[in-house]
Image: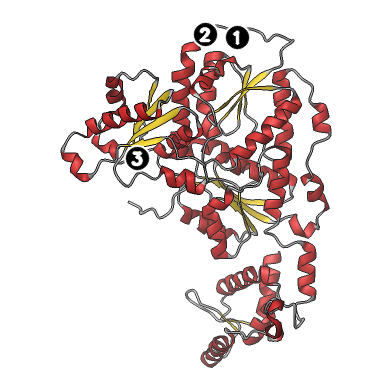
Amino acid sequence: MQLTVWTYEGPPHVGAMRIATAMRDVHYVLHAPQGDTYADLLFTMIERRQKRPPVTYTTFQARDLGSDTAQLFQDAARDAYERFKPKAMLVGASCTAELIQDDPGGLSDALELPIPVVTLELPSYQKKENWGAAETFYQIVRKLAGPKAPPPGTKPAPRDPARRARCNLLGPTALGFRHRDDLKEISGLLAQIGVDINVIAPFDASPDDITRLGDADFNIVLYPEIAMPAAGWLQRTFGQPMVKTVPIGMGATCDFIREVAALAGVDASALLDDPNSRAPWYAKSVDSTYLTGKRVFVFGDATHAIAAARIATRELGFTVVGLGTYSRELAREVREAAKLYGVEAMITEDYLEVEAAITELNVELLLGTQMERHIAKRLGVPCAVISAPVHVQDYPARYSPQMGFEGANVIFDTWVHPLMMGLEEHLLGMFREDFEFHAEAAPSHLGGAASERRAEPAAAPIADAFALAVETDDDVDVIEAEGPIDPVWSPEGEKELGKIPFFVRGKARRNTEAYAREFGVRVITVEALYDAKAHFSR
């Protein structure tokens, strides 16, 4: 058994919370002990929602296990209905309550509530959060839209040519990465194409809205991890085709427009000829050393990871050296995408494996989740967050979509700002010996302190280590070592290293030390530093 410190996804009942919190007039009764009641923390503190999530817990305690916990659940469900008056109710158990097998579905059926009740059976020890969200949405759609389904084999009636095409936008949830802003961007894009929106679900949808899903001409799957099972059922039941292209990045947005326009029977060429995005021009105009060939590692949910890899290679000129996901349900799609870049996909839920791969690949930019942001800080690597799980800072007050043409602008800014621009690199190199502007100078607003060059705290121990190496071996450069050695820096080598701009100095140090270990260099001199540089430049 492996002790988990951090996880990319919570248990499946957290996914159910995301669906319930996204919707209107829905309430979720969760059979759970004290300690599992953290919905308020997730949605009001992290996502900064203005109202509490619609979740009621039974909150049984240890002493309740010797009595009737089933009655506790029924009392909680009855009280939740009478207090909140929802139009539909979800019932289920948390991972802990699952063990006592109280059957929330059967218990709620016995109450004979006058509203639809959707029973959620979410195996907490086999599945994770995104699967729980997808299963919850699927069950809601089947329960509420199912009664209006046509008889099996019925072909959908052709659309009246005088009526504009209608679509459903499927997949956005609460606690989703930029879902709110993506909806605004894609809604505006569809209006420009000439397509009306029938229902957006589950985000801000009511049970009544779910019953109208069958009225649309086609479905748009914005987030496959959440919406694909429901969209597949709607396609089989109502004959509604689906748009699978996720419009993240310029190229994918253009592909999305073409796919939607084909299903709607409209001409969207004018929109493609004049896209409202500055990202393509910026990507072509920046210093070539600034973007081209940067080694990038991508990790996140499958949707955003696949999209990010495409943007990185086709639109920004990066080199993808690693691609992975924690979304096991979409592992096949990620593996297919990885083949395009000549890398092997990493499918894992262990962030330590991800950190090891990032360290080994010696990347120059990391595109990942909040977990990878922590990894990047430890390694000193530039990073941009592209996917959940995320920090509170990734729910900005400003408009910041990931999808559509404006999303391409946001992505460009977000990804390239952590990198050192070519002109900035040039200026830092030019002034690296300047008494005021060098990397080790104190801030200028501190007055006289700005002119005092900071001492090199590592100089003394480095000199001592160098002296020890000289005393213990006549050849201080190369030795025959049976096992791994721990190289030390000569004072001259350390001084030369200090001339390298600070933003790549850590990488240069790591590369040189790796070279020294591989080739048995005990003391890293100026010559060894440049030998390592030549080695890694091949």
* The C terminus, quarter of image: bottom right
Among the 4 quarters of the image, the one containing residue 340: top right
Task: Give percent across and percent down for residue 411.
Answer: 69, 47
Instruction: Tell me if residue 312 comes above or below residue 509 in the rendering.
Output: above
Residue at screen point 71% across, 70% down: 534
Q: Is residue 522 left or right of residue 287?
A: left
> SS class of the residue under badge 3?
loop
| Amino acid type, residue under disc 1 in the picture | Pro
Disc 3: CA contacts within 10 A as few (<14), some (14-19) or many (>=20): few
Task: Give percent across and percent down for residue 106.
Answer: 28, 23
The circle drawn on residue 125 is 3
Instruction: Tell me if residue 482 comes above or below residue 425 in the rendering.
Output: below
**Foreground mark, 2 or 3?**
2
| Amino acid type, residue under disc 2 in the picture | Pro
Task: Give percent across and percent down for residue 280.
Answer: 79, 45
> Alpha carbon of mark 3 to alpha carbon of mark 1: how far?
40 Å
Task: Return the residue at label 2.
Answer: 150
Nearest to N terminus: mark 1 or mark 2: 2
> SS class of the residue under badge 1?
loop
| Amino acid type, residue under disc 3 in the picture | Tyr
The residue nearer to you, when weighing 361 against 428, is: 428
The circle drawn on residue 50 is none
Q: Disc 3, disc 1: CB below 8 Å?
A: no
Q: Decide if residue 340 is in sight here.
A: no
Instruction: Tell me if residue 140 comes above or below residue 308 in the rendering.
Output: above
